[in-house]
């Protein structure tokens, strides 16, 4: 039988693991950890514990929703280095402010196999949760509120994922700080059903192949979902609402699937593609942006079918001397500005839709030409192109435009204003 200092009590479980009741006293957590065995649970009493902790073996640290651990403004508050660790029900505050050492509320190192970080509140730390090489991590149900006392780019990320294969980050709420989730040099990660507010990027991908971003909500960030230098990423069923620059950005992102997303009222572009190829865009909703979708830097061979473009100032910005078809097997996309007709009632417009004309191309390359928009010469050019489509310069053509839009299920994640 093990004996413990008088500050704790021991309750044996049927599985021979033990539960240790840790009172709110100076050094109580460290003293209990020194005597606990693998598989034991430390249950913290209500109150604030001012100490930093390292968990180096299978232990459950349970704050029961009433305990606070304060790192005192130095380093990382909780560092997990051992396998099979669970941290739950805690409020974690008081990390240091050093970007070089990635001072965090909770850090999971590469020796921390399959850690579980569940239902915690992390407030005011430089980085919220740093998954730094830990394989098979689960970070779920946490509330992360970052720093607000620095310029946004000088803050840390809410959840940082580096070289952590098969990490699952789900059902978390992240606010303030720099990026909600920043992933770098990792693969086979899943980020789903998280909510992001008041950040630079909601989800920021760099060199992260074969991963999933699904069911997330981004509200009022500078950019919703940025996928960069990555291949085979599934961006599905996400919401971007009132993001300031772009809803979805693909930068050197290839062979990915972007489907079922609901992007509304981005001040800049609903979707922006830069040198991104062979991506599948289908079933998305792009509404109320300055540009619905913008292709640049040679982005090509992207599939665009059954998307809905609603009330964007410019539906498509695509400069090309060749025609690119945006329909297949008799189905294209919906365009709110297309005054189409459907005589046979099959739900498909009877004439092709071409979102851009030669004047658009002139305005994109020579912005000063906007002064001429109301002139008779410009109106004559546009009338001529409408009457004689052969005069059009090339670009996007949807030969089978849809007569009605279909809202993706993701739209139900946020209130609708009609």
Image (cartoon, rainbow, N blue to C red):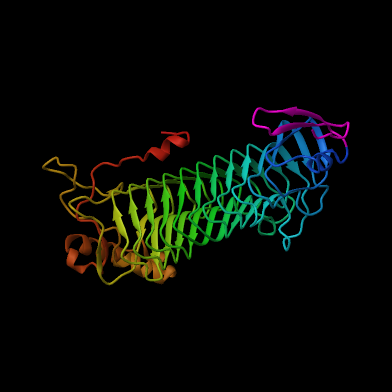
Predominant SS of the magenta segment: loop
Mark count: 0
Which quarter shows the C terminus? Answer: top left
Q: Quadrant of the N terminus?
A: top right
Q: Is residue 6 magenta?
A: yes
Vertical arrangement, residue 155 with respect to residue 265, above or below: below
Residue 379 among magenta residues:
no
Q: Residue 4: horizontal and vertical position, in percent? A: 84, 34
Q: Nearer the viewer, residue 65 or 41?
A: 41
Instruction: Kindly identify the residue that appears in the image at 26 percent across and 49 percent down.
Output: 338
Q: Is residue 45 above or below residue 176?
A: above
On the image, which quarter does residue 185 sit in? bottom right
Span highlighted in magenta in the image: 1-25
Give the x, y percent position of residue 348. 18, 46
Give above or below for 191 relative to 187: above
Q: Is residue 210 left or right of residue 305?
A: right
């Amino acid at each position: 039988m093990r004996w413990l200092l008088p500050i704790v009590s021991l309750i044996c479980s049927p599985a021979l693991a033990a539960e240790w009741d840790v009172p709110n006293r100076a050094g109580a957590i460290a003293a209990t950890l020194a005597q606990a065995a693998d598989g034991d649970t430390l249950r913290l009493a209500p109150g604030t514990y001012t100490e930093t902790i390292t968990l180096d073996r299978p232990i459950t640290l349970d704050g029961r929703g009433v305990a606070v651990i304060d790192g005192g403004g130095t380093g990382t508050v909780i560092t997990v280095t051992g396998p099979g660790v669970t941290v739950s029900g805690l409020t974690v505050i008081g990390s240091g402010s050093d970007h070089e050492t990635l001072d965090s509320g909770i850090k999971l190192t590469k020796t921390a196999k399959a850690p579980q970080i569940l239902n915690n509140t992390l407030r005011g730390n430089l980085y919220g949760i740093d998954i730094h090489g830990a394989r098979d991590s689960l970070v779920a149900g946490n509330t992360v509120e970052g720093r607000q006392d620095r310029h946004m780019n000088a803050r840390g990320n809410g959840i940082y994922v580096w070289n952590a294969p098969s990490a699952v980050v789900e059902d978390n709420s992240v606010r303030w700080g720099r990026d909600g989730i920043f992933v770098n040099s990792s693969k086979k990660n899943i980020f789903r059903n998280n909510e992001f507010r008041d950040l630079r990027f909601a989800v920021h991908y760099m060199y992260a192949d074969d991963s999933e971003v699904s069911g997330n909500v981004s509200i009022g960030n500078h950019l919703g979902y940025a996928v960069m230098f990555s291949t085979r990423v599934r961006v599905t069923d996400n919401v971007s609402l009132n993001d300031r620059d772009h809803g979805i950005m693909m930068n050197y992102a290839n062979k990915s699937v972007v489907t079922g997303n609901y992007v509304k009222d981005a001040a800049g572009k609903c979707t922006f593609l830069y040198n991104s190829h062979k991506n599948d865009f289908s079933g998305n909703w792009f509404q109320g942006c300055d540009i619905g979708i913008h292709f640049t830097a040679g982005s090509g061979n992207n599939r665009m079918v059954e998307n809905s473009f609603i009330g964007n100032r410019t539906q498509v910005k695509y400069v090309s001397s060749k025609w690119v078809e945006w329909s297949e097997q008799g189905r294209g996309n919906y365009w709110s500005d297309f005054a189409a007709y459907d005589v046979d009632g099959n739900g498909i417009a009877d004439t092709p839709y071409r979102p851009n004309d030669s004047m658009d191309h002139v305005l994109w390359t020579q912005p000063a030409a906007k002064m001429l928009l109301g002139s008779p010469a410009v109106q004559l050019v546009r009338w001529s192109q409408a009457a004689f489509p052969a005069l059009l310069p090339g670009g996007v053509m949807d030969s089978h435009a849809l007569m009605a839009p279909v809202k993706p299920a993701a739209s139900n994640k946020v209130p609708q204003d009609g």
